[in-house]
Amino acid sequence: MRLVKLIANLGYGSRKEIQMAIRNGWVTDKQGNRLKADSKTAFDDILFDDEPLDPAPGVVILMHKPEGYTCSIKDQGQLVYDLLPDRYRMRKPVLSTIGRLDKETSGALIFTDDGTFLHKVISPKSEVPKIYEVTLDRPLKGDEVELFASGGMMLESEVKPLKPAELEVLDDTHARLTLHEGRYHQVRRMFAAAGNHVTELSRSRIGSLGLEGLAEGQWKVLTEDDKALIFA
Ligand code: URA
């Protein structure tokens, strides 16, 4: 791909602006040589304004989403994209989230521009479990573990029963729930159906990939090893 298109697609500016940046000598290789629009420099050797380029297309990002941020590219209020550099919104192919977390849910959220990877994560065939840490308004009654594991639980206005889910009771009002599917507001609706109310919700893991070392609001580009953890 031509240098201008490549850099424009990463969101650094319009093609015109990138042509100008090249003419102004802002695009160089690591040795400081100015690049031209038709230069065939390896991606990792390209600097824009003395900085390495953002990750090439095919990127996968893990964010520790804070509460209060909406999983949307355009919406009112604080958006998860506000936590990434501005130009990430302009990338082509588009960087989208793999599934969503509610505005009031925190935790592990993955972004990618790789459609094949996205489908692999959400495909029922991959059976990627998602693990949620739940705080409840009222003490657990004692029948929730069995109810959630039954495979027969129906949520209001749905026609298919939920797949069995594993609930680990931590104490009266705290539990860890492992889901093997992703229905709308699923965790909150499951506890509502069990006569309770979720007051705090956080996704701690997607497969075996956790948030170790990532504070709320922070994010990182996943390595191949990190990506493999999702399916481990
Ligand atoms: N279940 C919910 O209820 N909310 C989320 O954000 C994720 C799962």
Image (spheres, rainbow, N blue to C red):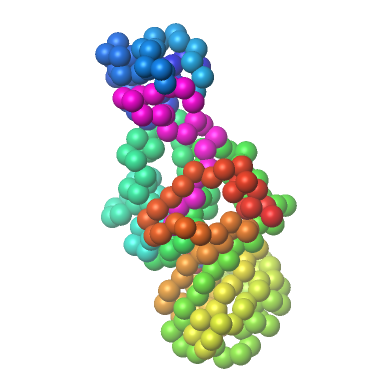
Whether the magenta-drawn stretch holds residue 48 is answered as yes
The vertical placement of 222 against 218, above or below, is: above
Q: How many marks?
A: 0
State which region is magenta. Answer: 44-64
Q: Is residue 179 left or right of residue 95?
A: right
Please tell me which residue is depicted at 50% across the width and 59% down the height of the picture. Answer: 211
Residue drawn at (65%, 57%), measured in percent from left and top?
128
Q: Was residue 71 drawn as part of the magenta stretch in this picture?
A: no
Residue occupying image coordinates x 43% and y 65%? 105
User: Residue 23's spot in the image, x, y percent?
Assistant: 30, 11
Q: Tell me what residue is drawn at x 45 percent, y 10 percent.
A: 39
* Residue 21 is at least partly visible in this image: yes
The image position of residue 159, as x and y in percent, is: 64, 66
Q: Nearer the viewer, residue 176 or 191?
A: 176
State whether residue 153 is above or below residue 67: below
> Considering only vertical position in the picture, is 172 above or below 177?
below
- Quadrant holding the C terminus: bottom right
User: Where, by quadrant of the figure, is residue 147 drawn?
Assistant: bottom right
- Residue furthest to the front: 31
Query: Residue 107, relative to residue 62: is it above or below?
Result: below
Residue 193 position, x and y percent, is 55, 79
Q: Position of residue 77 (x, y in %)?
A: 28, 55
Nearer to the camera, 141 or 168: 168
Residue 185 appears in the picture as rendered? no
